[in-house]
Image: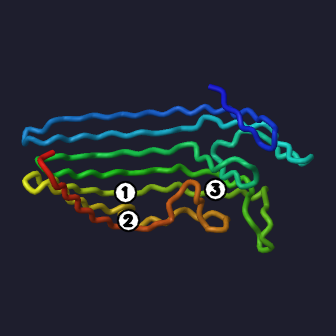
Amino acid sequence: MSLSARIFGHVFPLVMQIHTTDIRRQASLSSGGDFSIGGDATYVIEYDVDDFDIEGTVIEGGDRAGQFNRSNFSRSMPQLKANAFANLAVGSHNIRAVVRFIDSYDDERGTPDLSQDFDPEVGFEIDSQTTLDLFYNWDYEPWQTNVGLSVVNVFDEDPPLVFFDTSYDPYTHNPFGRTFKVSVTKEFGLGR
């Protein structure tokens, strides 16, 4: 696959190698329920970008995978992101847990000193982040009603510190702490 971007009349080739995996396993329980587990992961092997010229100013290209990329025009690119889940469905009840992982990556600008200048000789690694989300659904057929409860980011994990306006990477991490959601869905009419 070949992609390119047209910026100010110039065509720039974009070379990407992205590999994903998705694994799922389901088993029926003797109690009448179903239990399933699974996961998916994406590992960016490389994200090569050519030199970029803007009115005579050249931004050096290179492999952008595993970097924050604020010193160039590329987006943040942690090399590994993964999700794993476990789901239990028994009758009209369904419980699901999801673990989300974002690997650590480098801020290629380095570490800022007291004058707010970045020292590229002193590297800075943006920490990895792992969160847990829990979901519960109850589907009550006689009333054609579904009740859902969820807790996202159960352990209230903050996004990793980044030397940026928002103090986190808004292109990669979620700033919301623990959030709760309650939903009720009612169907009206003749059956489902």
Dot 3 or dot 2: first in sequence order is 3
Q: Residue furthest right?
A: 56
Q: Position of residue 184 (x, y in %)?
A: 23, 62
Q: Position of residue 103 (x, y in %)?
A: 53, 49
On the picture, is 106 further left or further right than 72? Answer: left
Q: How many residues crowd mark 3 within 10 Å: few (<14), some (14–19), many (20+)?
A: some
Q: Which residue is pictured at 12% across the width and 48% down the height?
A: 190
Q: Position of residue 41 (x, y in %)?
A: 46, 39
Give the number of the disc on residue 155. Answer: 2
Q: Residue furthest top?
A: 1
On the picture, is 166 further left or further right than 192? Answer: right
Q: Secondary structure at mark 3?
A: strand
How much space separates mark 2 and mark 1, taking CA atoms?
7 Å
Q: Amino acid at mark 1?
A: Leu
The N terminus lies in quadrant: top right
Q: Which residue is pictured at 38% across the width and 51% down the height?
A: 99
Residue 38, visible in the rendered structure: yes
The C terminus lies in quadrant: top left
Dot 2 or dot 1: first in sequence order is 1
Residue depth check, mark 3 versus mark 2: number of the one nearer the observer: 2
Q: Which residue is mark 1?
A: 132
Dot 1 or dot 3: first in sequence order is 3
Task: Name the residue nearer the viewer: 66 or 96.
Answer: 96
On the picture, is 124 further left or further right than 10? Answer: left
Asked if labels 1 and 2 touch by Cβ distance under 8 angstroms, the answer is yes
How much space separates mark 1 and mark 3, taking CA atoms?
23 Å
Q: Which residue is mark 3?
A: 125
On the picture, is 115 further left or further right than 66? Answer: right
Q: Amino acid at mark 2?
A: Phe
